[in-house]
Amino acid sequence: MSYDIYKSGMPEFSIAFSGNKSDRKLTHQELVRAIRFMIAAEYEAIQLYEQLAESTDNTLAQKVLIEISHEEKEHAGEFQRLLRELAPGDESFYKEGMEETEEKIEKMKPKVIPSKPAKASAKTPGKPKTKPQKK
Ligand SMILES: [Fe+2]
């Protein structure tokens, strides 16, 4: 049975040749799709590590899992930057999505009503209009 990771999307660990390189090079579009998949895998790993850390009282395991989850976030960032380079046409979609969320954030912010400027108090010392007379 031949195995093609790019058809199934997931390696099968029971197959010795699973995960070996493909017998041909990827096209640019296949590479872009693979990187998108890797980004999803990084986020999946972050979720698993944080979930496991929150599910145990073992402080050593918690520490290791949280540190690794931070590394996965760095990996996600590396892949995102790579994807930006490989698929610059996607940027306009990300920008559009970010702007849509930005508008929602702005609408949810509490409205700040500008306060009236404070009137000068009678107690507030002001500059005398006339010079005090000398005696
Ligand atoms: Fe990673």
Image (cartoon, grey):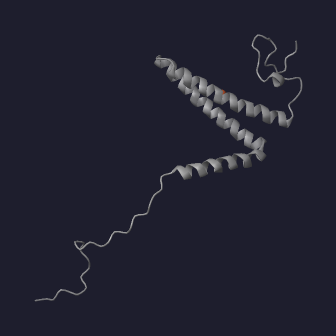
Residue 9 horizontal side relative to residue 132, left or right: right
Specify whether 78 is left or right of 58. Answer: right
x, y (%) of residue 101?
A: 62, 47
| Residue 84 image position (x, y, % from top left) | 73, 43
| Residue 118 percent coordinates (x, y) | 34, 69
For image coordinates 83% across by 33% down, the residue present is: 30
Would residue 96 be found to the left or right of residue 112 on screen? right
Residue at 26 percent across and 79 percent down: it is 127
Quadrant, the N terminus: top right
x then y, percent, for residue 128: 24, 82
Name the foreground residue: 121 vs 81: 121
The residue that appears at 84% across and 24% down in the rendered structure is 7
Q: Is 123 located above or below residue 25 in the figure? A: below
Quadrant (top left/top right/bottom left/bottom right) for the C terminus: bottom left
Name, please, the residue furthest toward the left. Answer: 135
Q: Which residue occupies 54% across, 27% down?
A: 67
The number of callouts visible is 0
